Amino acid sequence: MATWTDYKNYVKETNPEIGKDIEEAEALSKIVGAMIEQRHNLDLSQRDLAERCGIPHSSVARIESGKTSPNLSTLLKIFDQLGLSLTVQPVLNASPAGK
């Protein structure tokens, strides 16, 4: 395989379930990466962010380290304190679920 994209495409063709897992992991990585970047831009520690959100410091640490995936309400609390928004948009050429 020449690139990560080539490998992902190969996995999607040979094992669609694992391909979906890869896509999900990449999407979550982008979300958490944006969160970390903005926290750094605002010069906030994980503890500062946790206090602002009213959640345990350990929750922020686990989310940022990839040990856990945040639930939507926690993610929205964090994004609100960081001045970020979560946007949902249609995926081009996506087929409806179950079809």
Image (spheres, rainbow, N blue to C red):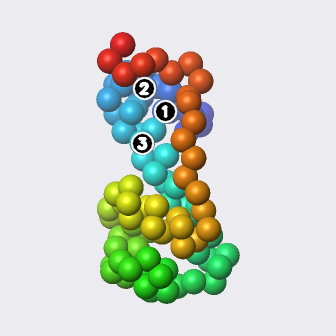
Q: Are marks 1 and 2 in contact (CB under 8 Å)?
A: yes
Q: What element carries label 1?
A: helix
- The amino acid beneath tag 3 is Glu
Q: Residue 12 carries which label?
A: 2
Quarter occupied by the N terminus: top right
Q: How far, Cα to Cα, is label 1 from label 2?
A: 6 Å
Residue 3 lies, in percent from the top left, at 59, 37
How many numbered circles are shown? 3
Vertical comparison of 51 with 89: above or below: below
Q: Left or right: 68 with respect to 75?
A: left
Residue at the spot of label 3: 24
- The amino acid beneath tag 2 is Lys
Q: Is residue 36 visible?
A: no
- The amino acid beneath tag 1 is Lys
Residue lying at 45% horizontally and 38% vertically, measured from the top left: 23
Residue 98 lies, in percent from the top left, at 32, 18
Residue at the spot of label 1: 8
Q: What element carries label 3?
A: helix
- Of the two numbered discs 3 and 2 in the rendering, the one whose residue sits closer to the viewer: 3
- Of the two numbered discs 1 and 3 in the rendering, the one whose residue sits closer to the viewer: 3
Q: Left or right: 70 with respect to 88?
A: left
Q: How far, Cα to Cα, is label 3 from label 2?
A: 13 Å
Residue 57 lies, in percent from the top left, at 37, 82
Residue 31 lies, in percent from the top left, at 52, 55
Ranked by sequence position, the earlier of labels 3 and 2 is 2
